C-alpha cells in the first residue's frame, strides 16, 4: 500500500483506490493534512479522514467543503470529529498548541460561512484566531471600535463581498500582514464575486494580499503560516 | 437652414454641413448646449461653439473632450472662451447664477482631470461646485476632516479609481444624493476602470448612483440638475 | 446589548446574535432602516424587522428581496406589515408624509417586479411615486402619451431590460434628474442584464444615472432623496 | 495561371503570387468582386483591383478598409477609380443599374465613416442608397421628420453607436427588413462597440438583424441583396 | 379600455391589467401580433392570445417561448390553437397566403427547437418555409446534395451551434439574403452560444446577417419580411 | 433510406427520423462511429448505437455523454454493450487490435470522469491506453516516479484542472506529442474551467496541444490517431 | 559557467548573464533549441543563437518573434543564418534530414505570417512541410482541389482567422492528426482572435487540436513531433 | 501647510499643491513612504521624494513606476538616489537594517523587471531579499537545485507569467508563506496576464497568496512585513 519516495526522503503514499494520499506532506511543509470534500462521496470523505488521522494521531486533520450528507456521515461514523455545518468543515484530532494570533474580520452577516471556514483553518493550522464581525465600511464607527484588536494581530484576514472596501480601510490603519478574501455576496449583479475580487487586487492600500473568491481555507492556511512564525 | 419642429413646438435645427445642431434642447431640458469634442476637427469644434453661443447669447456653452489642437484653436479663435487643458474643456459665455451646491470629492491626485471636467460642468449647468481633493480611504482622517463640507452639499459627486471604496464610505456618512464616478486610474491590472465601475455598482451603501468610467461630465450634469432644484 | 458610539455621537448597536443592527443610521442619513432579506432565514427577517420597528416606532421599516418563506412568515408573525410578493418587499410601520414626486417608468410587463420594488422604496423613503407602465420604445406613441406626467416629476426612474433604450428617449424629452435601472429581462442571450446595463451607461442623452441590474431598491432610495429635497 | 473548377462549373482562379483571386464568385452569387484592403500593401491593392476589373469589365469592383497610402496609390495608378477617404473605399468600373432602394440611417456625426462605407457598398452591389443623418433618439423629432423616406425603402440600415437605441425605435415604426450596424462610437467606456452590439442583438423590436461592429460593408451587401430582389 | 393614438393614426391599446397590448402594430408594420411567453403565467398567455385573435380575426397570432404549463393550458382553453412543444410555440388563427420561400437550414439534430421556432414564425409572418436538416460542415456532401433547394429560396436562415461554420459555407455558395442563427449547442465549453455568435459575426462570407443566440423567432420575422417582398 | 453520395464515393446515409447518420465517415477518416448522447433521448441513443453497429459489425461503436437514464436503457436493451457510468460512455462491438500506446495522465481524483472518457475513446479509436493517476504538481515525486511510463508512450494526454500546471511539467520532461485536457475542477472561482484552459494554451513548454474543457473524448480521438500511426 | 544536473543526467546550463540556457533540452526531448525573441534585445538574440549553435553544431537553432532590429542584427552578425522577415524567424545551422510530411494549410492571404512561422518550425524540428494557401471555406472548390495533398500528410496544420471554419471542414475530409491555429485576422470586431480560438475549440469535427492564437510555432513543434514518428 | 489629525494622533499632511502627502503613514503602519510615479510629472516625482526624505531623514523613501524622463530627472536632481531603470524605481536614503529573509524567485528572463521591483521594495521595507532566477517548471532540475535557498526564507515571492505554474510547484515543496506575482509575459494570447493571474488564484497548492499582475511592489511590501516579524 506504500511506495518509496523517489529521491530517498522516505515519503509514503496511501492508496485508497479512489485516491492516493500523500502521507509526508506534513514533513515537507509543516502543515496538517486536509481532505477537500467537493467531488468526494460521503464514504470517501470518512475514509480519507480516518486514514490520515491514523497516520498522524498526534495532530488534527481537516475536511473542507462538505455537503450535508458528508457532514452527517462524518458525525455518525467519526463521533470524535468536530463538524461545523455553516463552515462546512470537520476536524478530527487535536490541533497542536497555537502560536501567534490571526484577526479574522468579516464585513457583513452574509460573509459568515467564509469567516468560519477561515477561523477553523487557522486553528487547525496552528494559530489562534480572533473573530471580528459586522464591521462594514458603510458604518465606520463599528470598525474603528475594534482597532485595538486588529492592531494586536500577527496577521489579519479581511473577508468582504459587494465592493469589498474593507481591506483598503484596514490597510490604511495597520502595517500587519493583511490577506483579503473576496466573497460572492452581493445585492444585484456582481459576477459571482468578480467585483470583490477585482477590488481587493486593486486596493489603494499597499501590500494587500488576496486569495480566490470565498476561499476562507486558503487565507487561513496562509495566515496561520505567517502568525505561527511571528516573534 | 432651419426646419419646422414636427409637433409644433417651434424647435429649430442649425445645419453646419458636418452636423445638424438641435437649437431647442435648452427649451426642452433647461440645460445649456454642449459640444462633444471627440471625433470633431478643431475647426468643427470652433464652429459648433460659435453657432451655439450665437443662438444662446445669454448663457454659457460647454465643449468637452478637447484634444490639444482643438483647445489651442479655441483659444486662438474664441478669445473669450475659458479653456482648461487638464479638464479638456472650453466654456463660452457666462453661466447663469448658480443655485445649490455640489461637493465634488476626489480620492487621489490622478483623478484630477475627471474632477475638473465635473466641476466645470456643474458650473455651466447652473450650480456651485465645492472641490475636495486627496481624501482616499487608505487615510481615513483626511476624509473625516472634510465631513462638514460634505454634509452641506445638495448633491455629492465622489470620483475614485482603483477599488473605488470612497463612495461607500461617504454613503455611510451622509444621506444626500450621491453620484460615484469610477475612474480608469490604477496601479496594475484594473481592466481600464472596470474594477472601479463594478465596485461603485456594488456599493454596500444604499442609493449610490453611478455613471460611465471617467465620465465627469455626465456626473456634473446630473448633480447640477439635482442641486439647482433643491430647497 | 448596546455599545457606545466611538466618537461620542450616541449611536447604539443592537446585537441579535446573527447580526449587529446599526440603530443610528437614520440619524446620520435621514433614511429609514432596511433589512436585506437575501441570505437571512425567515425567522431572522422577522426578528430584524421587529427590532428595528421597535427602535423607530414613528416611521416605516422596509425589508427587500424576501423569498416566499420569508414573506409568509412575515405575514403570519407581523400582521401589520404590508407584504408584496411581486416586489418581494415588506413594510412595517407608517412612512412619513411624502415630499416631492418620483415618476417610476417601466418599459415592459416583465419589468414589473423591479418597478414595484422601486415604488415601495420611494414611498418608505419619504416621497410620492407615480407609476407609468408599458411604454417601451418600439411603440413610441405609448410613451409620448405620458409626457405630461413625466414632466411633472421631481425625479424619474426609468426601468428597462433588453436593449434599454427607454432612458435615452426620456432623457431627450426632459431635464429632470433621471435614474436608469437596467433589468435582466431579455428574449435570448443578454448576459443576465449586462446588455441593458452597458446601454444605460452609454446613453446618448447626457446626465443619465444608473444603478446595478434589477436594483429597484437602490434607484428608489436615490430618487426619494432627490425628490424630497426638491423645491 | 488558372485551374479547373473541380465540380465542372468552369470557375477560374487568378494567382497573383500573394493571393489567388476567385474570378467566378460573381457567377455563383450575383455579386461584384471585392478587395479587402486591410493587411495588403498599397501595390497589392492596386494589383487586385486591376486584375478583378479586367476580369469583369462590365461592372464595378470595390476595395474597402484602405489606409491612407493605399488610397493615394489607387488615385495615382488607377485614375478612373472613385476613392473616398472617409469611407476608406475605392470603386473601379461602373455599377450596374440600381434596383430597389436602401435607406441608410445614421444616428450621429461620428458614425459617418460607417454610413459612407455602407452607402458605397449598396451602390456597387446594385441598389440605390438614400442617406439620412443625425437622427439620434435623444431628439426624437429629428427622426420622426424623416419617417416618409424610411417608409419608402425596400431595406433599411440603421447605423448607431453608444447605446444604439435607434434600430429599436425604427423597428417600431416600420415593417421593412431592418439591419442594425453597431458602431464603436462612445463617450466613455463602451468596450469598443460591444455595448452597441449587444443592444442591437437584444432589440425589443422583432426581426432586427445585425452585423459586426462598424461593418458598414457587410450591411450594405445584405441590404442590396434584399432590395434588388424586392418587387 | 382604449386611448387615442397621440398623432391621430387611430391606434388603440387593450389594457389587460398585467399588460397593455398594442392593437395597431399590424397596421404600422404589416406583421401579425405576437405574445412573448417567458415571464407570463399560463393564464396570461391564454388571455393575450385570445384578445389579440379577437382583434385580428382574419389572420394568425403567434405565441413563443411557452413553458410546458402554458402549452398545456393553451391546448385546453384554445382548442383551435396549433401547439408545438418542441418549438415551444402556439398559433391561433390562419396565416395569410404565403408569399416567397424561406430555406431554413439546420446543422445538427440538437438545433431542432430553434429550427422549428423559425419555421413556424416564417409561416405566421406570411412566407413559405422549406426545412433542410442535418447538413453540418463535417460532412460536406450532405450540404452539397441540398444545393438546389437552397438556390431556390428568396431568403435563407442557417441555424448552427458549436463553431457555426455552416453560414460561411452557404454564403460561399449563394447570393441570396442569408441570416445566421447561432445556437447554444456544443460539446464542451462554448459560453452558452457565444462561440457560435462570434463566429457568425465574423463570417468570411460577405453579407451574413445575424440575430441573438437561439433566436429562431427573430430570424423568422426578418426572413419572412424579405421573402414576401421578393419578386 | 439511403441516398447517393454526391461525388460518387458511395457514401450512404441512414435516416432515423430524428437524425440522418453518416455511414461512410469511417471510410473517409478511418475512425469508428460515435453517438453524442447529450440532447438525445435514451431511446434515440439506443437506436443510433444499434443502427451504427449493424452497419459496422466488425468494429466498435462509441456513445459519449450519456445521462443516467440513457446508460440504464443501453444496459437493458443492448446487453453486449460495455457501459461506464463514471465516464458516461457505452461501447458496442469489439475495437480493432490496438496500435501504439497513449499515456493518459490525470492530476487529481476529481479529474477521473474525463480521464476515463479519454481512456475509453483511445481504446475504441484503435490504440492502447496506459492510465496514470494522482500525479499533481504539488507533489512532484509522484509524477517523477512515473517518468518511465510516460517516456514509453507514442502520445500523451495530460488531464488537469485548477491551474493546470501538469502539462507544462510533463512537456519539460519529454518530446512526445502532448495533448492537454483542461478540466472544470477547482476549489473556488475558476470560471468553469477557463483558468485551466488559458493555462494550457499559455504553457511555457513548447508544442503543447489542447482541446476544449473536459473534452476527454476529443483528446482521445486525436491521441489514438497519432499513436496508431507511430512507428 | 556550468553546474551539475541534480539527478545526475549530465545536463549543463550556459549562463549568459541575462539568461541561463538549458543546453540539455535536446537530450531530454529530441528537439532543437529555440530562442524566443520577444523581450530580448537584438544583441541578446544574437548571443543566444550563437551560444546554442556552438553547443549543437550538427543541427539547426531557431529564433522566433524577432522584431525588425533583431532580424537586421542577426543578418549582419550571423551571415549564415536564414532570416525571414514575414515569419519573423531566423535559423542557424542545418536541420537534420526530414522525416514525415506536414501539410500547413492557410485560409487566407492575411494568415501568411503565421503559416510561414509554422512552416519554418516544422523544417527545423525535423519534418517536411507542404504549404497550401488561400483555401477558405467561402470558396469550397479551392479547398477540395487540394484534397489529395492533404490526404498524403502525416499531420495537418490548419491556419485560419475570422470564424475559423476551415479546421472543421478539413476534419470532415480526413482522419489524419489535425492541429488548428486560430489567427487574429478579422474584418471587424473579433476580440483579437478570441472568435477563431473559440471556434477551433468547438469544432463539430472530432479530434481537432488547437494552440494559442497566432501560435504557428507551437503548432509546428507539435506537428513535426507527430510526423517524424509516423510510419 | 499642515493640519491637525482629527483623532489626536499628531499626524501631519504636507500640501505640495498637486498632492497632499500623508507624513504619518510610517507611524501608523511601520512602513517607509512611497511615491507612485505613474501619472506624475518628473518634477512632481522629484519634489515628492525630496519632501518625504526631509520628513524621514533616517530611513529610505521609494519611488516606483518611473518612466524614463522621471528616472533621468531624479538622477540629475537627487544624486544620492539609487535609480534602477529596469525596475523603474528610485531609492533615497538608507533603509533600516534588514530583518528576516525573502526569497524572490523568477520563472524566466522576461519577468526581470517585476523581480527587481520586488527586490528593491523588500530592501526598502526592511528585509533581506535573495534573488533566484530562471527556474521555470519546463526544466524542473533548475528549480530543484535551488531548494535549499528557498527553504531558508521567511517568506517567498514567486514571479511567473505564461501559465504561472511555478507557485504551485514551490508550494508543494515548502510550507513558508508564499506570494505569487503573475506577470503579463506570454507567447501569444494571454489576456495581458489574466491567464497567469487566474492560475495563481487556482493553485492546487494550499495557501498561495496573490497580488495584481506585475505588482512586484505589492508583493515586496507584504513579504517584507511577514519576514521582518518572523522569529
Image (tube, coloured by chain):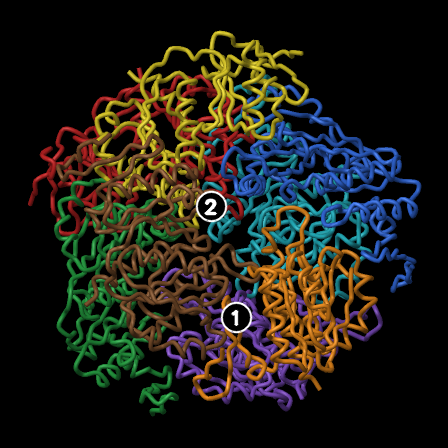
Chain colours: A blue, B red, C yellow, D green, E brown, F orange, G purple, H cyan
Q: Is residue G204 above or below residue F27?
A: above
Quarter in which the C terminus of chain B is drawn: top left
Residue corresponding to mark 2 = E67
Cα separation between marks 1 and 2: 27 Å
Cβ atoms at labels 1 and 2 below 8 Å apart: no
Could you say which disc has been placed on residue G222 in the image? Answer: none
User: Which residue shows up at 85% across the image and 48% down it?
Assistant: A47
**Residue C211: x, y in percent?**
42, 34
Identify which residue, F95 or G136, lies in the foreground: F95
How crowded pointer 1 is (Cα within 10 Å; few <14, some 14-19, many 20+) is rated as few
User: Which residue shows up at 31% across the image and 58% down it?
Assistant: E123
Which quadrant of the structure image shows residue D157?
Answer: bottom left
Q: Is residue D139 above or below residue B17?
A: above
Identify which residue, C36 or G30, lies in the foreground: C36
Identify which residue, C77 or D94, lies in the foreground: C77
Quarter in which the N terminus of chain B is drawn: top left
- In the image, taking residue B220 as reference, residue A152 lies left or right, namely right
Identify which residue, B56 or F36, lies in the foreground: F36
The local secondary structure at tag 1 comes to loop
Circle 1 chain: F
Which quadrant of the structure image shows residue A131?
Answer: top right
Q: How many marks?
A: 2
**Residue F192: x, y in percent?**
60, 52
Circle 2 chain: E
Residue extending farthest top: C58
Residue E115 visible in the current orientation = yes
Residue corresponding to mark 1 = F16
The local secondary structure at tag 2 comes to loop
Which label sits in the foreground, 1 or 2? 1
**Residue E87: x, y in percent?**
43, 55
Is label 1 on the same chain as label 2? no
How crowded pointer 2 is (Cα within 10 Å; few <14, some 14-19, many 20+) is rated as some
Amino acid at each position: 500500500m506504500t511506495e518509496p519516495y523517489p529521491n530517498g526522503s522516505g515519503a509514503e503514499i496511501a492508496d485508497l483506490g479512489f485516491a492516493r494520499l500523500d502521507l509526508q506532506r506534513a514533513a515537507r511543509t509543516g502543515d496538517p493534512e486536509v481532505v477537500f470534500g467537493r467531488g468526494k462521496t460521503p464514504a470517501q470523505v470518512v475514509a480519507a479522514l480516518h486514514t490520515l488521522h491514523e497516520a498522524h494521531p498526534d495532530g488534527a486533520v481537516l475536511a473542507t467543503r462538505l455537503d450535508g450528507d458528508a457532514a452527517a456521515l462524518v458525525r455518525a461514523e467519526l463521533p470524535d470529529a468536530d463538524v461545523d455545518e455553516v463552515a462546512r468543515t470537520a476536524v478530527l484530532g487535536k490541533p497542536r498548541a497555537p502560536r501567534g494570533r490571526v484577526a479574522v474580520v468579516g464585513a457583513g452577516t452574509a460573509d459568515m460561512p467564509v469567516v468560519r471556514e477561515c477561523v477553523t483553518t487557522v486553528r487547525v493550522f496552528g494559530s489562534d484566531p480572533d473573530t471580528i464581525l459586522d464591521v462594514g465600511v458603510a458604518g465606520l464607527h463599528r470598525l474603528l471600535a475594534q482597532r485595538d484588536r486588529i492592531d494586536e494581530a500577527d496577521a489579519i484576514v479581511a473577508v468582504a463581498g459587494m465592493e469589498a472596501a474593507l481591506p483598503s480601510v484596514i490597510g490604511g490603519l495597520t502595517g500587519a500582514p493583511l490577506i483579503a478574501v473576496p466573497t460572492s455576496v452581493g445585492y444585484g449583479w456582481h459576477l459571482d464575486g468578480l467585483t470583490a475580487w477585482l477590488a481587493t487586487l486593486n486596493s489603494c492600500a499597499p501590500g494587500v494580499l488576496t486569495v480566490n473568491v470565498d476561499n476562507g481555507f486558503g487565507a487561513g492556511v496562509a495566515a496561520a503560516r505567517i502568525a505561527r512564525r511571528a516573534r
